[in-house]
Image: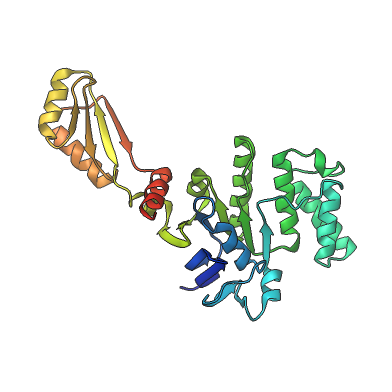
Amino acid sequence: MTNLAIEANGLRKSYGEKVVLDGVDIAVREGTVFALLGPNGAGRTTAVKILSTLVAAGAGTGGIRVGGHDLAADPQAVRAAIGVTGQFSAVDGLITGEENMLLMADLHHLSKEEGRRVTAELLERFDLVEAAKKPASTYSGGMKRRLDIAMTLVGDPRIIFLDEPTTGLDPRSRHTMWQIIRKLVAGGVTVLLTTQYLEEADQLADRIAVLHGGKIVAEGTAEQLKRIVPGGHVRLGFTDPDAYRGAAAALPDAHRDDESLALQILSDGSQRDLRTILDRLDAAGVEADELTVHTPDLDDVFFTLTEAAR
């Protein structure tokens, strides 16, 4: 596979007898969002810490390359290429938002002029100009998280690790954060995201890996993962009892609900499947009053995979 921003082979890590990662492979294409899903304790944060050089990989780990650099041979080059926003805010509440940004610019060895330019640009980009002169301790959770990511971007990283970036945020702040992440990726940034919100992975990720028991138990696009789980169906509703009976005769495999005049047919929700059902109704001269399609969502996938892996 070419154009990989992150590539890890056989990622391993144990703490004493506790195996946290047991041979995990991760491949993230440039300019995409890769989401690591898993229950608490699954090893998501440990994977991020290893890939961002914060924790050493365990014995037996294969090669790790981040931003084209070998992590073992040149960790400093990896650090220069990445940005990390951890689960817990790195914002110093005792100083202002602007001072937090300028401190980060100093840590990146930017000149005073360049530091002020980058700070002003990012404060405006993240809608923090009005709050810039106020102590960060007065910021809301959503504002602190925006400041956190703005600080991560001071060094203009092309790869960003976001470890549960929206945990604890209200729905409006979460959606704002999603917009920020989408804009970053549209600008060519690669994002490795860990999250406990399945909707978040569904909304943002190009590829999703489900981590459980130290192993990846499934990986693919959201749509590919949803097809792993059975249970998709089409529901047809009728108001006319004669039409209902005609449809039931045309679709003998359907589950009948005579009380509500509804039929439920197993289906993967594909266009071909729907066309077959509708063609059979047309041939019988029957028209449904209501048609709904249910396909398994990531909740179904997550619970099925993590239960099966126990």
Residue 234 in the figure: left or right of residue 15: left
Residue 267 in view in this figure: yes
Between 308 and 1, the one lying in front of the other is 308
Above or below residue 56? Residue 134 is: above
Q: Position of residue 280 (x, y in %)?
A: 14, 37
Above or below residue 89? Residue 233 is: above
Between 198 and 109, the one lying in front of the other is 198
Above or below residue 238? Residue 219 is: below
Residue 179 in the figure: left or right of residue 237: right
Taking the spot 69% from the left edge, 70% from the top edge, the residue there is 79
Taking the spot 31% from the left edge, 36% from the top edge, the residue there is 293
Q: Position of residue 90 (x, y in %)?
A: 75, 53
Residue 75 in the figure: left or right of residue 133: left
Residue 219 in the figure: left or right of residue 189: left
Taking the spot 84% from the left edge, 58% from the top edge, the residue there is 103
- For the view shown, which residue lies furthest in the right direction? 112
Q: Position of residue 194 (x, y in %)?
A: 56, 54
Q: Position of residue 134 (x, y in %)?
A: 86, 41
Taking the spot 82% from the left edge, 52% from the top edge, the residue there is 100
Of the 4 image quadrants, the one containing the C terminus is bottom left
Q: Give residue 78's quadrant in the image.
A: bottom right
Picture colour scheme: rainbow
- For the view shown, which residue lies furthest in the front direction? 17
Residue 126 in view in this figure: no
Q: How many marks?
A: 0
